[in-house]
Image: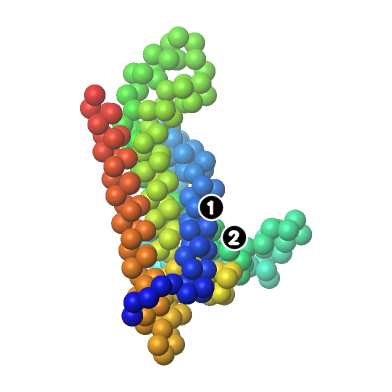
Amino acid sequence: MGGTLGPEEWQAVALSLKVAFWAALASLPLGIFVAYAMARWRFPGREILNGLVHLPLILPPVVTGYLLLISLGSRAPLGAFLQNFGIVFSFRWTGAALAAAIMGFPLMVRAIRLSIEAVDTKLEEAASSLGASPLTVFFRVTLPLSWPGILAGAVLAFAKALGEFGATITFVSNIPGQTRTLPSAIYAFLQVPGGEGAALRLVMISIALAMGALILSEILARRMSGGGRS
């Protein structure tokens, strides 16, 4: 079962890293905005927004993938409309990134929200009293102080994206070189005789990547907690 990775295995690893990277990066601005809104604003429908954000954690991933398929698939009205502008998600790596971003979004928002809530509001109020606009307060005070939590949230979303399977395979299938990420590749190798060795190698890589991401997230969370106590 040992040995080096073959071309198909390397392809799955590279695609997974690509999908996870763009899933975390593309969802980060929205994640910061939603986390800030949940941490600092009071508005009608706040609990509904909180429920929608965390819904992917509760729903079966296959349900999320199916909802993406019927809304952004090539035959869906919205999906067909976006295709006119060259934006295609179904059965493409971009669709895998979208599905992974949605599944990791709750973890990202929660980590960022906790980091923003840990920022002393008196510092923000002091900046406002000196004439700083709300945007200036956010970019000069809130954002820098919550930066470790923001990075932790991005790392958690990246780790979740690496392991996403159900929503991805439902929405974009399992196409080698296009949508076959690490979990899909492991599943595919386990379906063929003699594929156990390749599957095991990819499992070990998945564990190593996930553990590395979790350790980095924990380090960032401790740094955030230490900053809040000082």
Q: Nearer the viewer, residue 186 or 139?
A: 186
In the depicted structure, whether residue 154 falls above or below residue 189: above
Look at the numbered discs 2 and 1 and tell me whether their residues touch, using CB distance below 8 Å.
yes
| Res 134 seen here | no
Earlier-in-chain disc, 2 versus 1: 1
The percent position of residue 185, horizontal first and vertical second, equals: 46, 74
User: How many marks do you count on the picture?
Assistant: 2
Secondary structure under the numbered disc 2 in the rendered image = helix
| Residue plotted at (42% across, 28% down) | 144
Badge 1: few (under 14), some or many (20 or more) residues near its Cα, within 10 Å?
some
Quadrant location of the N terminus in the rendered image: bottom left
Residue 105 image offset from top left, x and y in percent: 44, 51
Q: Position of residue 221 (x, y in %)?
A: 29, 40
In the image, farthest residue toward the left = 229
Furthest residue toward top: 130
**Label 2 crowd bin: few (<14), some (14–19), many (20+), radius 10 Å:** many
Residue drawn at 52 percent across, 68 percent down: 11
Residue on which the image places disc 2: 94
Q: Quadrant of the C terminus?
A: top left
Image location (x, y in percent) of residue 2: 34, 77
Q: CA distance from mark 2 to mark 1?
A: 9 Å
* Label 1 element class: helix
The residue shown at (49%, 11%) is: 131
| Residue behind mark 1 | 22
Amino acid type, residue under disc 1 in the picture: Trp
Name which residue type carries label 2.
Thr
Q: Looking at the rendered structure, which numbered label has been put on residue 204?
A: none
Depth check, front residue: 183 or 75 = 183
- Rendering quarter of residue 141: top left
> Which scheme is used to colour this image of the protein?
rainbow
